[in-house]
Image: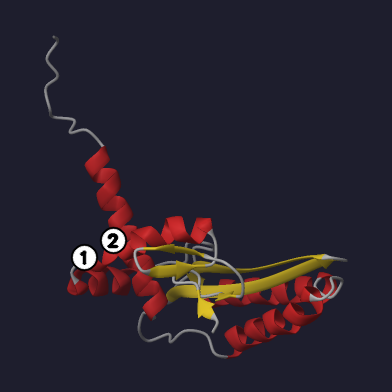
Amino acid sequence: MLDNCAYCGSTILFGGAEAGGLKFCNAKCRDSGSLLAAGHSVPEDLVEEAANVLHQGQCPKCGGRGPVDVHVSHRVWSLIFLTSWSSRPQVCCRSCGIKSQVFDTALSAALGWWGFPWGLLMTPIQIGRNIYGVVSGPSPTQPSAKLKDFTRILLVSRAQAHAETPDQNQEVKPS
């Protein structure tokens, strides 16, 4: 049975990494996803409020008007017996998301087919995922579940950074 990465959503064909009862496609997603597991302790109303603010804000990539959401672009490239495929989630406006998906579709169409056997198998899958993303995309009226998860991660990472920063008002006494 195939699993999906709890962080980026890509299909896990082989291996993967686990943390906190969640499965991830690689160590990078596992490290980012560990914040997601910790984020389930954040109150849901706080997540909803922060996700709505992010959703209606400006695009972090182009600075344009929202709605902003998580858009995933998929790519594959191959060279004989070496094939690499990835899914790249990014928080941006629909226009920036479509640009990434179209770029990765063109890259995959040009460079994906050249590997055996995975290039021949993964290229149409990644191109199909991009086409689906361009045609459907997240709802412009409300934040997606992926954006809420991103918001959870953002809130937890900010709380951890705040906890690790020493209080500026605290007096340091010499020993």
**Res 7 visible:** no
Cα gap from disc 2 to disc 1, whole angstroms: 6 Å
Q: Nearer the viewer, residue 31 or 18?
A: 18
Q: Nearer the viewer, residue 67 or 107?
A: 107
Could you tell me which residue is drawn at 55 percent across and 81 percent down? 2
> Compared with residue 165, is residue 72 higher up or lower down, i.e. above or below?
below
Looking at the rendered image, the quarter that the N terminus falls into is bottom right
Residue ranking furthest to the top: 175
* Amino acid type, label 1: Ser
Looking at the rendered image, the quarter that the C terminus falls into is top left
> Compared with residue 19, is residue 130 higher up or lower down, i.e. above or below?
below
Could you tell me which residue is drawn at 61 percent across and 73 percent down? 73
Give the side of residue 146 with respect to residue 27, left or right: left
Q: Nearer the viewer, residue 118 or 105?
A: 118
Which image quadrant for residue 47? Answer: bottom left
* Amino acid type, label 2: Ala
* Disc 1 target residue: 41
**Res 119 visible:** yes
Question: Can you give x and y, in whole percent of width and height, for residue 151 in the image?
Answer: 34, 66
